[in-house]
Image (cartoon, rainbow, N blue to C red):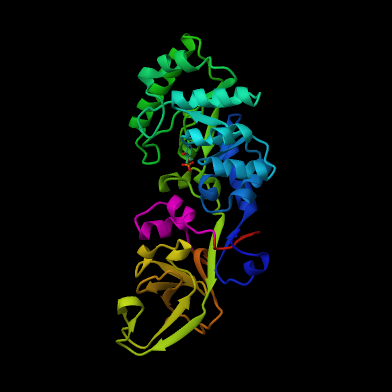
Amino acid sequence: MLHSPLFKFQHPTVAEIDLSAFKENVRQIKQLINTCKLLAVIKTNAYGHGIIPIGKKAVYAGADGLGVTTVEEGALLRDNGIDVPIHILSAITLEEVDAVIRYRLTASISSGEIARAISRTAVQFNQTAIVHLKIDTGLHRFGVDPKRAIAFCRSYYNLPSLKWEGIYTHFSSADDGDFATTEQQFALFLDTVSKLNMNGFNFPIRHVGGSTIAIERSDMHLDMVRSGIALFGYPPAQRQRGIISLKPVLKLKSKIVQIHELPANTRVGYGGKYVTRSIEKIAVVPIGHGDGYQRALSSKGETLVHGKRAKIVGIISLDQTLINVTEILDVKEGDEVVLIGKQGNEEISAREVSGWVDSIVDEVLASLMERIPRIYV
Ligand SMILES: *Cc1c(COP(=O)(O)O)cnc(C)c1O
C-alpha cells in the first residue's frame, strides 16, 4: 500500500468503488449465463478497482473462480484468504512455476517446456497441478496451434501430477462485433476439441469468451464464461447497452484547490497552450497524468462541477489539471469535481472519457494509479 489509512481521508482525489453495484453486475452476468460457470476476470488490479476487495466480493457474489494475468496477483489473492480456483490467463515463465504450484494457481498451458516444469514441480511438492490447455484460434497471442494440438497432447497430456481440467481459446474480434471471424474461430476450437476427444484427450471445462460472449452469444457459453469489464459496469461495446443494463462501479472525484480569475488573453498552463477569451475563472484540480489521468485529455476532456460540465484547459501536468469554471455560479475552492461518474443530473462515463482520447474503457480504468486511494462504499 502506498498510503496510510489516515492519508486516505486527506487526499482530495479519490476513487469511490461501489461494491454493491459490482455485486449486482455479477448477479446480472450470472443470470445471463445461467448454469454455466463464471470466471470473474479481475486482472490489472481488477481493472483499476483494487484486486483484494473486488476479489473477495466476486467470490461472495457467486463467481466460481477468478482470472488474473500475473502470478503475483494470483499469489496476492491466495495470501488474502481466497480459496476458489485462480486462473492465470497469460503465459508464465519457468521462474514462476514454483509459485504457481505453491499458491495452487491454475496455469494456462501453451508450451511443452512449461507443462514439463509444472509436472516436475508438482511431483516434487506431492501435489496435482490443475491446468487448462490454451488453443490459438487466430488471436496469435499465445496458445497451441490447432494443427499441432494432437501431437502436443501425445507428448504432454500424460505427464505425471497434471490434471487437464479445461481447454480454451480467446477470440480476436468479438468485441468489434465481427461475428463472422468469431464463428470461424469458434468452429476451429470445437473441431480441435472433438479431435482431441477422439484421441482420448479429454478436458471437462471448455471456454471461449469474455463479456461480449456472455452478453451476446449464449450459443458460445459452453462450460464457463470469463467475464471482466462488464462486471465493472461497462459492456465491452456500446451496441450491447440495449441488452443489459450494468452499473458503473468506479467514481473518480477530486476537489478544486485554487481558483484564478484571469483577464482576457491570458496564457494558461505549461506552454501557455490555452488563452482566455474574456475574463475567465480557471480552477486547479489536483489530479494529473501521474495519477493515470491521461495527458492526452489535455484541452479535450470535461469534468463536472455543481452538476455542470467544466472543460479541461491547457496541458494536464503530472499532478494538476486546469478546468474552466467561468460558467459555474458561486463556484469556490473546496468544491467537488467529478472526473468519472455522476454529479447531480449529469454523468461522465469512463466510456465518454475513453472516446475523448480514442481509447477503450479498460485502459481508462486500469490506468488509474495505485496512489489514488480507493474508498469502498
Ligand atoms: C481479459 C480477458 C478476459 C475478459 O475480457 P472482458 O472483455 O473484459 O470480459 C477473458 N479472457 C481472457 C483470456 C482475457 O485476457
Q: Is residue 51 visible?
A: yes
Asked if residue 363 is among those painted magenta in the image, a careful observer would answer: yes
The foreground one among 165 and 3 is 3
Quarter of the image with the C terminus is: bottom right
Quarter of the image with the N terminus is: bottom right
Q: Residue furthest bottom?
A: 263
The foreground one among 75 and 321 is 75
The foreground one among 352 and 163 is 163
The foreground one among 358 and 110 is 110
Residue 198 at x, y = what percent? 47, 9
Residue 237 at x, y = what percent? 42, 46
Q: Is residue 129 above or below residue 367?
A: above
The residue positioned 56% from the left and 79% from the top of the image is 334
Q: Is residue 61 visible?
A: no
Query: Which stretch is magenta?
Result: 348-370
Q: Quadrant of residue 170?
A: top left
The residue positioned 31% from the left and 79% from the top of the image is 272
The residue positioned 55% from the left and 30% from the top of the image is 224
Residue 186 at x, y = what percent? 41, 26
Residue 39 at x, y = what percent? 57, 36
In screen coordinates, is 101 left or right of 116? right
Asked if residue 102 is among those painted magenta in the image, a careful observer would answer: no
